[in-house]
Amino acid sequence: MPKPDDDLIQIAFEEHKKNVGLALIHLRDARSIVQSISEIRPHRALPKAALLLATAAIETNLSYLSGIAERFIAARPRKFSAPHMDFIRGVQQLVDDNGKIVEKKVYHPLTERMQIIPSLLARAIDRQYRPSSRTAASRKMRRTIACRDAIVHPSWDRYVAEAGWWEAAEAVDAVELYLQTVDAALSPYLPGYMFMLRTIKGPTKHDVGVGHRTLGKKAPERAKSTMQEVGVVEVMSGEWLDSVFMTSIALGHPTEADSDGSMLTRAALVLLYAMLDAQLAVVAQWRMRENPVLFTETELLFLNEAAVGVNHHGEIWVDTTQHPFKRRIKAIPAVLARCVDQIDFLPDLGSSWGNALLTGYDLRNRVMHSSSPSAPLPRVSKQELRAASGAVRAYFEDLASRVPKAFGHMHVFLGDVGSHSQKLESQFIRSSLKPKTG
């Protein structure tokens, strides 16, 4: 076995000292939440929170590894070319109209970065990183990422109706097993990873080992859902109550008493904006299906987040697209106001609550997607969570009062939440979008 390169080990150790929080904090928090979830009693909010923090741990670990990779590439330049560094930094170099070289930010899919970033690290030490895509660990990761996507940006045809201990535990298992493959390929060049991967000791003697939680256990039979199968009332009330529950717990819980933020405030912030997305998605779909003739084809495509084009053979293709957050929160209410309420309306994001709404979403993005190893991991203070929660509430208050036909039902949530299900049921009693029954 070749002698390790001491200079690269030193580089990795220096990066570990600076950025250990990126590698550890989200995974630690996800583990802690999983331990608090009952395997028997169903509950959606805590499992979703654990799953979101677990997948955020993948992002922050990739940011951590990218910091090491940048320095490895600088230390071994002959083994790499400019595109390698561009990929690590998430940029693409182009020549503009004036002949100048400019950098453009590029988004690489998570699954692509999970493979390529460790591969570049391995290249620096003359190794290869080629995990099999057919292992149980890979299948766990694919299910976890799909579930994450459906939680943070739910759509009519992609919705997480049920989530419990299993989904949360599998997510933590998947992240641990992935990091274990990275550590195995790069050891001893990732100091601290073996310590990080030791599972926090649980209440039983069996709660030890990497990726052990769902080992040998049968997965519950939970079919993929759509919002229509669940029902408009259940989607709206369930998402709202999940968000209220997590926000209340996060603001009132003494976790991490030495600071003003915790794993719960981060999870609550992410669920808050997932709820906002879910509400807009289900209202848009409900109103379109209730009276589709009110909408033009272009408006229907936008609300369905569909992209349409014509290929070289003259054939029409249809694909899905995801609109940026700012466009969704402005344009969806504007389209519904024009088509359903027959009025011109645009949410005022220049207001105090509008600025707070965008600030909270920026913080949410920094929680879920660490932009660079040098960027500190946000803790999300209770004050920041309160501000974001108040902004989301003010946003829906504005929609409910200004666009009453499309969003008037939101008064039910904004008022007496205790009896919201019965009130909503009476509003939607004639709707064709109620959940299917036997």
Image: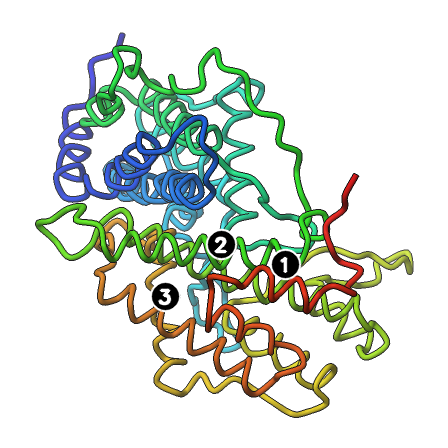
Q: Which residue lies furthest to the left in this view?
A: 258
Residue picked out by circle 2: 107
What's the residue type where badge 1 is placed? Answer: Val
Measure the alpha-carbon separation of dots 2 and 3: 17 Å
In depth, the one of 314 and 404 nearer the eye is 404
What's the residue type where badge 2 is placed? Answer: Tyr
Q: Quadrant of the C terminus?
A: top right
Residue picked out by circle 1: 233
- For marks 1 and 2, the one nearer the N-term is 2
Figure check: 384 above or below 147? below
Residue picked out by circle 3: 362
In depth, the one of 308 and 364 nearer the eye is 364
Measure the alpha-carbon separation of dots 1 and 2: 36 Å
At x 46%, y 72%, the residue is 414
Q: Residue 149 carries which label?
A: none
Can residue 81 be spotted in the picture? no
Can residue 48 be spotted in the picture? yes
At x 42%, y 73%, the residue is 393
- Mark 3 burial class by Cα count in 10 Å: few <14, some 14-19, many 20+: few
Please tell me whether mark 2 sits on a helix, a strand or a loop.
loop
Badges 1 and 2: C-beta atoms under 8 Å apart?
Answer: no
What's the residue type where badge 3 is placed? Answer: Asp
Q: Position of residue 59 (x, y in %)?
A: 38, 44
Q: Where is residue 245 in the image (x, y as percent from the top left)?
A: 38, 53
- Mark 1 burial class by Cα count in 10 Å: few <14, some 14-19, many 20+: many
Please tell me whether mark 3 sits on a helix, a strand or a loop.
helix
- For marks 3 and 1, the one nearer the N-term is 1
Badges 2 and 3: C-beta atoms under 8 Å apart?
Answer: no
Figure check: 338 above or below 254? below
